[in-house]
Amino acid sequence: MEIKYDVCGVGNAIVDLIAPASDAFLAEHNIAKGAMTLIFDEAQVEKLHSSMAQAKTVSGGSGANTIAGIASLGGNAAYIGKVANDDLGNLFTKEINEIGVAYDTARHIGGPATARCMINVTPDGQRSMCTYLGCSPLMESVDLDEAKIGASKILFLEGYLFDREEAKAAFVSAAEIAKKHGRKVALTLSDLFCVSRHKDSFLQLVKNHIDILFANESEILALYDVEDFDEAVSRATADCEIVALTRSEKGSVIAGFGEVIKIAAEPITKVVDTTGAGDLYAAGVLFGLASGRELETCGKLGSMCAFEIISHYGPRPEQNLADMARAREL
C-alpha cells in the first residue's frame, strides 16, 4: 500500500475545557491537584462545567493533540477516535479537519455523549483534570480504518484508551494491521494511573507489538517495577527499537540502536500550562522519525514542541511548529 501519512493516531477523541483556577477552587470541588480524575456521573460533569465560567473550549485528547502537533510541523496525519452525534462531536470533527488531519470515524449514535476534559490550571502551571470519557472508550476493532493505518509510516496508540477489553483487542488488531503493511507501531503509556491499572497488559503489548515507546519517568519505572531510571531505560530498549522518555525540567532521554541520548529541556521563564506537554513532545519525536531525522534531532524537536505548548493555555500549538523547527535548523 502506498504511503500517504506520516502518522496515524488511535485514541480518545475529547473536547477540552480549560480555565484558570485557584487552589481554593480545587478544594471546593474536590479536585486532585496535578492529577487526572475520571468522572462517570453526567450530572456532576454538568455542575463542574457550569462552574468554569472562563473556560476556553478546544478539541483535545492526548493522541489527537499529538496528531495536531505533527500537522503543525508540516506532516501528513490521520486520526481514528469516537465522538457522538452532538455539538461537541461536531466541534471536534470540524477543528481536527481544519488543521489538515484526515478524520472521518463514524459517529457514535445513542448512549454516552462526546467526551470532555475539564482542565483547571493553577498559577503554578499545574493542570488538574476531571475527565468524562463519554463514548470515546467505546472503540472496537470494527472502528479501525485499515486504509489509513496501512498508508501511515507510523501507527500511534494512546494509552488512555487502553481500558475496556474491546479497546485492548482493537490495539492489537491495529498493530497487526500496521505490521502487515510493514509499518512501525508506537505507544504512549499516557499516565501513571493507566500503567498501574494495566501493567501486565501493557507489558504484553510492549514486548510483542511496539517499536517506539513513549513515557515519562514515573511511568517507565512503574511499568518495569524498578527504582533506577537507567535500569528502566535498559529494560525498555530490550523490548522496543526506540524509547523516548520525558523527565520534566531534566529534559528527556531518547534511546535506540545502541545510543542513549540526553536532551535538555528548552529554557522558559514562566510555565503557563503543562497540558499537552508530553503529547507535543511525542509529536516532535514522531515527526522526526517519520521524516528520517537522527535520534538526537528527533529529541530536540520533541523538546521544542513541549516548550511551545507550556508557554500558553491549551494543548494545541499556537505557533507554527514548522517555522520554529526551521529557525532552530532542526
Image (tube, rainbow, N blue to C red):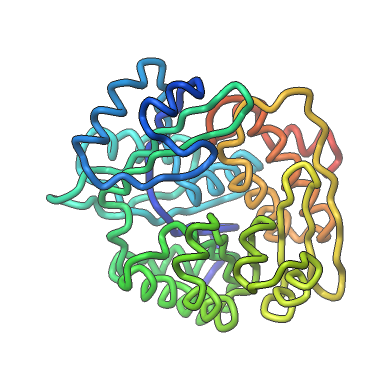
- Judged left or right of residue 113, residue 6 is right
Going 84% across and 56% down the picture, which residue do you hit? 296
Q: Quadrant of residue 93?
A: top left
Q: Quadrant of residue 257?
A: bottom right
Where does the image place residue 262, in percent across and percent down from the top left?
Answer: 86, 55
Looking at the picture, tell me which residue is in the foreground, 13 or 264.
Answer: 264
- Camera sees residue 136: yes
Measured along the vertical axis of the image, is residue 188 above or below residue 201?
above
Looking at the picture, tell me which residue is in the foreground, 8 or 60.
Answer: 60
Going 52% across and 64% down the picture, which residue do you hit? 195
Exactly how many numbered labels are in the figure? 0
Looking at the picture, tell me which residue is in the foreground, 109 or 277.
Answer: 277
Where does the image place residue 231, in percent across and percent down from the top left?
Answer: 78, 73
- Camera sees residue 95: no
- Judged left or right of residue 274, residue 22 is left
- Judged left or right of residue 243, residue 280 is left
Q: Quadrant of residue 242?
A: bottom right
Measured along the vertical axis of the image, is residue 291 above or below residue 46?
below
Where does the image place residue 44, in percent across and percent down from the top left?
Answer: 24, 35
Going 50% across and 78% down the picture, which residue do you hit? 200
- Judged left or right of residue 141, residue 158 is right
Viewport quadrant of the C terminus: top right
Looking at the picture, tell me which residue is in the foreground, 229 or 293.
Answer: 229
> Going by the picture, which residue comes out furthest to the top?
54
> Going by the picture, which residue comes out furthest to the left?
110
Where does the image place residue 130, in percent across and percent down from the top left?
Answer: 39, 39
Measured along the vertical axis of the image, is residue 208 above or below residue 58?
below
